Image: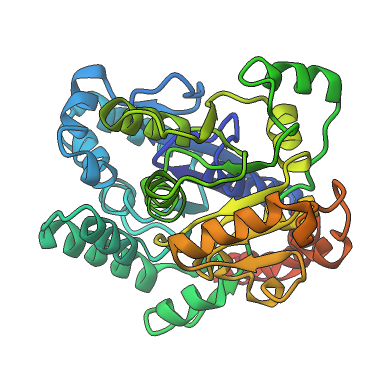
Amino acid sequence: MRILQLGYYPIQPAVTGGQRRVAKLGSLLTSLDAEVLTAAIAPHRPDVSPADIVLSKSLNDWVFRVPYDFEMRVRHAVESDEFLSRQVKTMLRRFRPDLVWLEHPFLWPLIKRLKGHPNVAYSAHNIEWAMKRDYLKQQKICDPYCVNQIKLVEDDLASRAAFIVCCSEGDRANLKHLNPNILVVPNGADRPQVADPAKARGALAQYSKRLFEVPTFTYVSAAHAPNWFGLLDLVIEPLRNNPPRRDFVILLVGGICSIYREWEATNGPVKDLEIVAVPEATEDEKNLALLECHAVLLPITTGGGTNIKTAEALLSGKRIIGTAAAFRGFEAFMALPRVSLAGTGPEFSQQMIRVAAPAAGGNPCAAGSGAGDVAELSWDAILRSAREPVAALLSDLGRK
């Protein structure tokens, strides 16, 4: 079976949570003897691959004139451009997929029009229209048309798909009225490991000599606005308004640093608090930041689906301070002794101060300890469990 796994952003290299999920699902399909072409119809970005169809710079500028609606505008840009439309048609004609595996719903109208009602699987990362509604509300933007258009596209794809693969039981409950043929493949992570600790430690030390020498709290995130809202509301603003008496460092890793820097440029640095931003960490540097910190922060308040960063934090074996929302899909692990739930800024500050105070029992777990109880969250375990049910779905499709 030939499967076109198609996304609206580049997949390789797999850095962000969404990219990692797409890459793991692609590897699962390949392991089932499918011929898989993983490609994207993507914005103009430096990480595109040769298989991707990329917007021109001028079309890219048009797409991002309404940044919060860029996902849908990518499709409109291709539809308005004869050259790009031909590229998509050529890809479909040359590869001749038996199944189009759509990561996210946004490109569905384009594929339906060019391919003519193909066999399609909906690989759902979130309930996209609901996440967009919540995002716009958080930003105080009123655009019901944007939300409604996503809902129409997502509902149409979900109802027409041969099957749906989603991240959680919650998402299954939201989609089952559209399509009963739904498989939950949870998000997972690879257990954090560091191949060259000395090199990674030296690289991070260039950002701050105090990292891990004083209580250090790590937050790993892509430049995903919903993840920033929680960090700002639950961690940065409360500590800015009520500086901690204890000395500690907040270590930001990944694309979230760019959003923080923009905020800092407008609001100024947070006094009496060291926030270290490492925007382009290697895998070793990111993993060291997780394994040597005193606690991992998960201040997630909005968004959809489930968070790969939660699985990664659980597999690290470290103390975790997070919201209940961060544990969507991971509710079974909320009662672990090393998990502290916090829903408000004062609660986050209180838990961080407790971790930073050894006399109050705040000593961090040893790196990697206590992780055996969450082994089922590894990608290896998840894909092993998903192999048979996904094979059955593909087999049923092949018989139709």
Q: Quadrant of the C terminus?
A: bottom right
Counting every numbered tag in the picture gives: 0
Residue placed at 87% from the left, 60% from the top?
370
In percent of width and height, residue 282 lies at 67, 25
- In this image, 75 relative to 42: left or right? left
Q: With respect to residue 174, does 385 lie above or below?
A: above
Q: With respect to residue 255, does 105 lie above or below?
A: below
In percent of width and height, residue 58 lies at 19, 19
In front of the other: 273 or 153:
273
Residue placed at 50% from the left, 56% from the top?
299
In front of the other: 162 or 145:
145
Q: With respect to residue 287, does 372 lie above or below?
A: below
In percent of width and height, residue 139 lies at 22, 52
- In this image, 307 relative to 177: left or right? right
- In this image, 223 relative to 387: left or right? left
Q: How is the image coloured?
A: rainbow
Residue placed at 46% from the left, 37% from the top?
256
Residue 381 in sight in this render: yes
In front of the other: 324 or 378:
324
Q: With respect to residue 175, does 276 lie above or below?
A: above
Residue 121 in sight in this render: no
Residue placed at 52% from the left, 33% from the top?
275
In percent of width and height, residue 315 lies at 77, 54
